[in-house]
Structures are given as C-alpha cells and as structure tokens.
Image (spheres, rainbow, N blue to C red):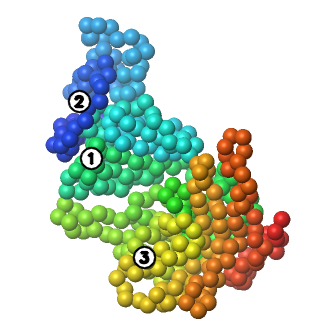
C-alpha cells in the first residue's frame, strides 16, 4: 500500500475515532503535538505513490524538516530528531508503542488508557513513560492492527483478537465495555523463535528433559501443554513443534495465528469472527473438523477452550498420533477436569466415564508449565496419562520441579528431577524407532 493511501486511511480513522469512542480521555498535550499534526497534513497533501519503507522514511524526514523550517520559533536539533522519529513510528509503525514493540527486553505491552502504558520486563510489570494523545489515538492504532487481518472493532463488536506481522498476539477491547477507554494487550514473540537450547538456558527445563521431550514428539506421542495465563505455553508448544520431522504434513489451528513453525510442509488455519450481520463465523471446532479431511500427519491446535476439545480427542484417537495442543490449568489433574468440561461444552450428551476413557486413550503426556512468583517460567511436571482405574484416569509424574529456596537476587531456586518411574509409553516410542536410555529416569 502506498504511503498516500496509508495516511489517508489513518486520517479517516482519526476522524472517525471520537464517534466510535464516546468517552474521550485526553492526556496533557506535549509541546510539539500541533506541529506533528501539521506535518501529518502536509504528508497527506504532498506524498504520491512511493513504495518501500526506506523511501517513505526519507520522505517523512524531508517533509517534516520543511514544515519545521517554516516555524516562527526554531525547533532545536534534538527535538527535530524526536519529532521525526515519532512521525515515522506513527506512519510506518504503531505510533507511541512502536519503540516498545522493537525492544527485545519487553515481553508484553499493556495499554490501559491513553496515559497509562505498562510493560512486562523480565517477568515484572513496569509503568512506561509512553503516552497517547487521547482515546481516538489509541483507536487509530487498534484499527491499524486489525484492518489488514479483515477484522473489525466497533461498538457492535467491541472486542477483537488479532496478531502482528511477527506473530505477536494482540487483544483489544473498547468502550462501552472498557470504561476507561480503549485497551490493548500485546503478547510479544521473539523475532527468531526460541529453541530448546534457549529454554535450557532460561532454566525452563533441563537438557535431559529437553532430549526426553524431543523423543516424545518424534515418537508421535499426543501431548497437551498445560499452564496458567502467561506461563509460556505457546512458546513451549512452538519448541515442541520444531521437533516434528520435516517430511510430515502439519496442520495448525488457531484463534489468531501465532505459532512459528519452521517446517516447510505446514498449513495454517485461523478462525473467523462473525460479520456485521452476525453471520459467517468459523469456529475452532469447524477448523479442527475440517483439518481431519486435509490428510494431516500432525494436528497442532493452538489452544483448546471449548467444544473443539472433543474433536481434538477424536483426532488423537483415530490415527493422528503426535498431535499437540495447549490448555489452561494449574495442575495436570486440573487439565483432565478441564478437558472433561470442554468436551461437555460440545453439546454431546456423553456419560462422564466415556469422556474419561476418551481422554485416557488419547492423551499420552501432559507438560505442566508454571509462572513462579519471581516471574520465571518453569516446566514443573511431565506427567504420563497411564489409563483408567475404575472411573478415575490415572496419572504418573515422570519429572517434577523441586523448589529449594531463593538466591540473593530473590530468584527461586530448584531442580527438575526424575521420579524414578519408567513411563508405560516407552513401548510406543520403541515401536516408532525411538530409544530412551533407562538412565534418563533414574533419581539422581
């Protein structure tokens, strides 16, 4: 899209902003705000069809300098550079939060209101010095994020899930649901997907556990990554997915596509919300069912939240071994209860025992991930689903995280240790040509 079209679209969004957001909060106006508005208007008037971000940046700098030269009061050199940088962020990026999105030390950006933007850095929440002009400015950034994806946000549909081009996950919610103005939450992902070596370096797991998980994925075990919000489930799912052999066909199903698979043979499916008439929605369940007709070797579901859990379990039980998914739960046992509840949400009148038998037959391994009090993310349990005993699904921990205390910096210390139990699915791995030495399960 040319810069002229981008700027005209921005102008339309800005002019529509106050109508969409009835309660407009305004922050203290910074001294060069009017100047930037005049430069923006000049850009719209003077720019013609030019392509390439480098060309556009140069054009923004040229026109901005021209307008500032016309000012009665000279603009200092340092302020000129700042104004130009902010305009480039506004035109080519996502406005005030663009520097935060480029900062690799920041893992999450949370816009609570125009004058309150928090970031997560090293697991801790910090108030940044970033501010928007007003609610309409925040709305403009939201529109810029969701418009390329064919999604919409307005009073009739005041919530939206979206993604940035790099795969970062975005949630936005606006008035009348958000009382203090539009809110944006962005879960950032690394430009280069993390590898198992990165997780070992971060202390999320040990080298031995990493090798064990790689063997489980290559050996086509059905794995559920369980954990709370922000515990790192999607990152772990990305790493596990990287172990899938390149000669297998992978179909991914997500609400907002964020998995970063590096294999060549990958089909990515994404849900679609209803249109303005309330029709045309495509749900996770629709996509999981459709994926079964696409001749997948592996199905990777970003997250099961409701009735699609039934279709996922059936896929795992009908020849799609090696499928992966994530779910919200605080313990492996809770994950089983959540799966039961989600299957019932599919509207099928199934007896609880039948659901539990499906789960026990389908799921081989639960990877439990937690975010500890110090902000670190650790795998705390690797738990085998062994089968049924009466009406109860039996679980057996293979590895567990043992907390030993805190260091001088307040970081939680501990170790991931094997429980000494040799999992039953070793036979399945052996049948698939994967051999794990007995020493991997010895208590040390």
At 31% from the left and 18% from the top, the residue drawn is: 31
Q: CA distance from mark 1 to mark 2?
A: 33 Å
Of label 3 and label 2, which has the lower sequence position?
2
At 68% from the left and 73% from the top, the residue drawn is: 397
Q: Secondary structure at mark 3?
A: helix
Disc on res. 44: 2
- Residue 218 place in picture, x, y as percent: 66, 71
Q: Badge 1 local density, few (<14 within 10 Å), some, or many (20+)? A: few
Q: Secondary structure at mark 2?
A: helix
Q: Nearer the viewer, residue 133 or 429?
A: 133
Which quadrant holds the C terminus?
Answer: bottom right
Nearer the observer: mark 1 or 3; the answer is 1
Q: Quadrant of residue 425?
A: bottom right
Q: Is residue 409 above or below residue 35?
A: below
Q: Quadrant of residue 443?
A: bottom right
Q: Secondary structure at mark 1?
A: loop
- Residue 37 place in picture, x, y as percent: 25, 25
Disc on res. 179: 1
- Residue 50 place in picture, x, y as percent: 32, 34
Q: Is residue 439 something one can see in this rendering?
A: yes
Nearer the observer: mark 3 or 2; the answer is 3
Report the side of 390 relative to 97 (left or right).
right
At 72% from the left and 64% from the top, the residue drawn is: 209
Q: CA distance from mark 1 to mark 3?
A: 31 Å
Q: Which residue is mark 3?
A: 342
- Residue 207 place in picture, x, y as percent: 74, 59
Q: CA distance from mark 3 to mark 2?
A: 51 Å
């Amino acid at each position: 899209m040319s810069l002229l079209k981008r700027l005209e679209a921005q102008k339309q969004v800005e002019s529509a902003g106050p109508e969409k957001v009835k309660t407009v909060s305004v922050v203290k106006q910074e001294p060069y705000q009017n100047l930037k508005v005049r430069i923006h208007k000049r850009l719209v008037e003077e720019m013609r069809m030019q392509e390439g971000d480098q060309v556009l940046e140069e054009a923004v700098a040229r026109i901005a300098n021209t307008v500032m030269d016309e000012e009665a009061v000279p603009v200092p050199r340092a302020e000129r550079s700042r104004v130009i940088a902010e305009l480039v962020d506004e035109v080519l990026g996502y406005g005030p939060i663009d520097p935060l999105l480029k900062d690799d030390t920041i893992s999450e950006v949370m816009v609570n209101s125009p004058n309150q933007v928090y970031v997560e850095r090293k697991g801790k929440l910090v108030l940044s010095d970033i501010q928007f002009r007003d609610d309409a400015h925040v709305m403009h950034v939201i529109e810029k994020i969701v418009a390329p994806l064919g999604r919409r946000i307005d009073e009739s549909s005041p919530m939206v899930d979206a993604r940035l081009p790099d795969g970062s996950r975005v949630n936005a919610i606006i008035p009348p649901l958000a009382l203090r103005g539009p809110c944006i939450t962005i879960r950032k992902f690394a430009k280069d997907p993390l590898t198992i070596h990165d997780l070992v370096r971060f202390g999320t797991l040990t080298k031995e556990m990493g090798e064990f998980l790689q063997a489980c994925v290559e050996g086509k075990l059905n794995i559920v990554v369980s954990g709370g919000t922000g515990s790192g489930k999607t990152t772990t799912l990305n790493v596990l997915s990287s172990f899938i052999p390149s000669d297998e066909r992978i179909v991914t199903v997500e609400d907002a596509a964020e998995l970063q698979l590096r294999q060549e043979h990958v089909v990515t499916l994404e849900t679609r919300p209803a249109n303005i008439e309330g029709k045309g929605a495509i749900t996770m369940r629709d996509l999981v069912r459709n994926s079964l007709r696409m001749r997948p070797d592996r199905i990777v579901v970003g997250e099961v939240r409701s009735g699609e859990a039934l279709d996922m379990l059936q896929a795992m039980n009908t020849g799609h071994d090696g499928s992966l998914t994530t779910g919200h739960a605080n313990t492996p046992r809770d994950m089983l209860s959540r799966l039961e509840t989600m299957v019932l949400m599919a509207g099928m009148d199934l007896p609880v025992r039948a659901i539990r038998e499906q789960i026990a037959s389908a799921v081989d391994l639960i990877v439990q991930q937690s975010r500890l009090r110090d902000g670190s993310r650790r795998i705390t349990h690797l738990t085998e689903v062994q089968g049924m005993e009466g009406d109860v699904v039996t679980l057996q921990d293979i590895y567990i995280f043992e907390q030993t205390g805190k260091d001088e910096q307040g970081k939680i210390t501990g170790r991931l240790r094997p429980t000494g139990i040799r999992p039953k699915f070793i036979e399945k791995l052996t049948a698939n040509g994967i051999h794990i030495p007995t020493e991997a399960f010895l208590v040390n």
